[in-house]
Image: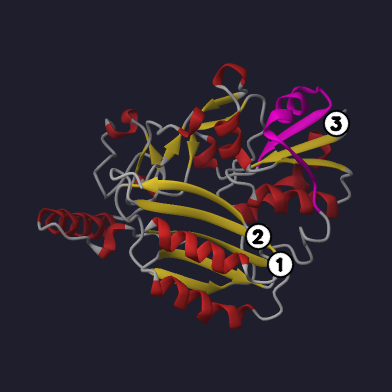
Amino acid sequence: MDEQYPIKVAALYRFVAFDAPEELQPRIQAQCAAGGIKGTILLAHEGINGTVAGKPSDIDALIAFLRDIPGCAELDVKYSHAKEMPFYRMKVRLKKEIVTLGVDGIDPKREVGTYVQPEDWNALISDPDTVLIDTRNDYEVAIGTFEGAVDPRTKSFSEFPDWFRAHRAELAAGKTKFAMFCTGGIRCEKSTAFLKAEGIDEVYHLEGGILRYLENIPEAQSKWQGECFVFDERVSVKHGLELGEMELCHACRRPISQEDKASDYFVEGVSCPACYAERTDEDRARFAERQKQIALAKKRGKQHIGVNPRDDG
């Protein structure tokens, strides 16, 4: 174990048919509690999705436990490490979907696009017959994406179906192939299932997502531009999964640059240029008080539970 990074973080998902996810919930919650693991796991009839953190041995035990669940032997897991525990509680939640698209009947277990390995991705997206679509949220795309990718400018993944239906004709003009990507694979796996259901025949997605591409493809050969936003304390990563330059606005959980921090709209823990107009004076006063309490708790060497005001679970 790296003494500088004693916490192991696991981002995991698997599309699998659970007849009774409510029966799995207490079992998984108990396993996490036994190991002092914190984070969020979502369960639905369509599968499991989550990010958790803890001591390496406890995380390894949890992953082994999850892989023993029928249908989860091939659970997709991506690991990283942190200096401190990035989460403040453990939640195992029941949901309608493990990643919210909002379209009934979409089942990646039944029909999904063709998986493309990172080593073959450049050739596919360089093909003039390919439409390349970034399925992530607008604030993620803003700090980095693949060369030539279409940005839907969606605020959430659930906006993607309406966007695609509205722009399908212009996207498909003279093209037959659709290639999709996201951070770790779960959103593009579901979005390719959606496109197949919409009658698109040639649909592809990047297996393992951007993270596996950045890990496997040398920068000199890469078609990635910028940094990749990640939903943990690293905020963003670059090629080789090296730590990026972005930081986090603790008011809205969006990535911020040094230029953003120089803005008059930036106040630590209170606002940034992206969220200033979205908040009221009352919101900012409340965030300022919370930030004050966080600073006091940190001075005393304790964690303040309100450090993460956004709960998307």
Circle 1 — which element?
loop
Kind of residue indicated by mark 2: Arg
| Residue for badge 1 | 71
Q: Position of residue 108 (x, y in %)?
A: 76, 58
Report how far apart the C-alphas of labels 1 and 3 lie in the structure. Answer: 40 Å
Residue 261 is marked as none
Query: Residue under circle 2?
Result: 14
**Three-letter amino acid code of the residue under disc 1:** Gly
Residue ID for mark 3: 173
Write down the region rendered in magenta.
Answer: 112-134
**Most foreground residue, 264 or 149:** 149
Residue 313 shows up from this direction: no
Q: Nearer the viewer, mark 1 or mark 2?
A: 1
Nearest the camera: 254 or 302? 302
Badge 2: residue crowd in 10 Å (few <14, some 14–19, many ≥20): many
> Which residue does the image show at 61% across and 33% down from the upper left?
213
Q: Residues within 10 Å of mark 3 (few under 14, many from 20)?
A: few
